[in-house]
Amino acid sequence: MGVLTYESEVITAIPPAKMFKACILDGDNLIPKILPQAFKSIEYIEGNGEPGSIKKVTFGEGSQFKYMKQKVEAVDKENFVYIYSVIEGDALMNKLEKITYETKLEASPDGGSVCKTTSKYHTIGDFELKQEGIKAGKEKASGIFKAIEAYLLANTDAY
């Protein structure tokens, strides 16, 4: 088993506290609402959001995947940090044991925020993950983040 680590950043005009609340704390409700073609539903099957909770993400018809299960590893509401792992589903392609994402929102000088994400891909056997796969995942995550930003800019009273 190998571990490939990848880091990325996305800049947004939304302050960290508001973005964390919309994207992380209420993302299970908001994301399927604003991106129904990508996400059909997100529901907890164990727990209710605290570390150790398991949620099932059912993808929409516009996705190449059917579902995934995520395990919440850590939630730090004061420092805007969220860590979770994809532990099951066709997104792992039977080639990955899990993918762990650590997301941290930090204030930017202009009043918005910088979303820093560290992704750790835990491969099975000698499987080598291609850069194209990582890039595609990063682009999808960035698209979700930007969709949430657009929603919050259009609905200034939300969150």
Image (cartoon, rainbow, N blue to C red):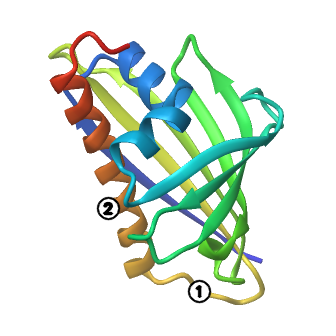
- Residue density around tag 1, few if under 14, some if 14–19, many if 20 or more, within 10 Å: some
x then y, percent, for residue 74: 71, 31
Q: Is residue 137 left or right of residue 152?
A: right
Q: Identify the residue at horizontal 52%, vertical 30% (top origin).
A: 24
Q: How many marks?
A: 2
x then y, percent, for residue 60: 47, 63
Q: Quadrant of the N terminus?
A: bottom right
**For residue 126, which quarter of the picture?**
bottom right
Secondary element type, mark 1 = loop
Which is more toward the observer, 45 or 141?
A: 45
Q: Is residue 150 above or below residue 41?
A: above
Secondary element type, mark 2 = helix
**For residue 148, which quarter of the picture?**
top left
Q: Quadrant of the C terminus?
A: top left
Q: Which residue is mark 2?
A: 139
Which amino acid does the dot numbered 1 rest on?
Answer: Glu
Which is more toward the observer, 49 or 117?
A: 49
Q: Is residue 152 above or below residue 117?
A: above
Q: Are marks 2 and 1 in contact (CB under 8 Å)?
A: no
x then y, percent, for residue 4: 59, 68
Q: Which residue is mark 1?
A: 128
Which amino acid does the dot numbered 2 rest on?
Answer: Glu
Q: Identify the residue at horizontal 72%, vertical 29% (top origin).
A: 49
x then y, percent, for residue 157: 26, 9
Q: Is residue 92 left or right of residue 21?
A: right
Which mark, by number, is residue 63?
none
Question: Which one is earlier in the sequence, the residue at label 2 or at label 1?
Answer: 1
